[in-house]
């Protein structure tokens, strides 16, 4: 399976999960649930867009992969705290947040240094 299809599917799943978690948060969920929902919803269209434009760019694919994993770690940690009463692992949320920043910066580098298509 091509990575672009994985990105598109992940973006769609992030969108669905974000909507479901937004509903859960509005019915008495904590701010952790609302924050996880927001991060999933913010990154869903980015992953879908990357699936459409990143073909052939190794840097953009790396940035997208970092972003995907970082959002999973960050949101997963917030949800584990709320629903399981414990963290995924120590410093998971800060690592996920740092990973998201790294992913976005990698995407910026990919945009600046990608080969030009003439």
Image (cartoon, grey):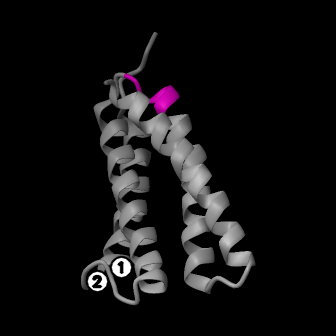
Q: Position of residue 46 (x, y in %)?
A: 55, 45
As rendered, which of 44 and 111 lies closer to the eye? 44
Secondary structure found at label 1? helix
Give the extent of the magenta segment.
51-55
Quadrant housing residue 41: bottom right
Mark 2 lies on residue:
91
Q: Which mark is residue 94?
A: 1
Secondary structure found at label 2? loop
Q: Residue at x 41, y 46 (%)?
A: 107
* Mark 1 → mark 2, Cα distance in angstroms: 5 Å
**Direction left: furthest residue:** 90
Quadrant housing residue 39: bottom right
As rendered, which of 5 and 81 lies closer to the eye? 81
Q: Residue at x 39, y 76 (%)?
A: 77
Is 52 part of what is drawn in magenta? Answer: yes
On screen, residue 27 versus residue 54, left or right, reads: right
Q: Residue at x 40, y 54 (%)?
A: 67
Is 5 part of what is drawn in magenta? Answer: no
* Circle 1 Cα neighbour tier, 10 Å, few/some/many (<14 / 14–19 / ≥20): some
Instruction: Name the quadrant of the N terminus.
Output: top left
**Direction right: furthest residue:** 26
């Amino acid at each position: 399976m091509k990575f672009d299809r994985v990105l598109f599917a992940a973006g769609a799943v992030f969108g669905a999960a974000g909507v479901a978690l937004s509903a859960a948060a509005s019915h008495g969920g904590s701010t952790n649930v609302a924050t996880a929902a927001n991060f999933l919803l913010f990154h869903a269209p980015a992953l879908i867009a990357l699936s459409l434009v990143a073909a052939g760019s190794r840097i953009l694919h790396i940035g997208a992969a970092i972003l995907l994993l970082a959002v999973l770690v960050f949101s997963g940690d917030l949800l584990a705290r709320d629903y399981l009463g414990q963290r995924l692992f120590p410093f998971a949320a800060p690592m996920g947040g740092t990973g998201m920043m790294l992913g976005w910066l990698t995407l910026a580098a990919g945009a600046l240094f990608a080969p030009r298509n003439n």
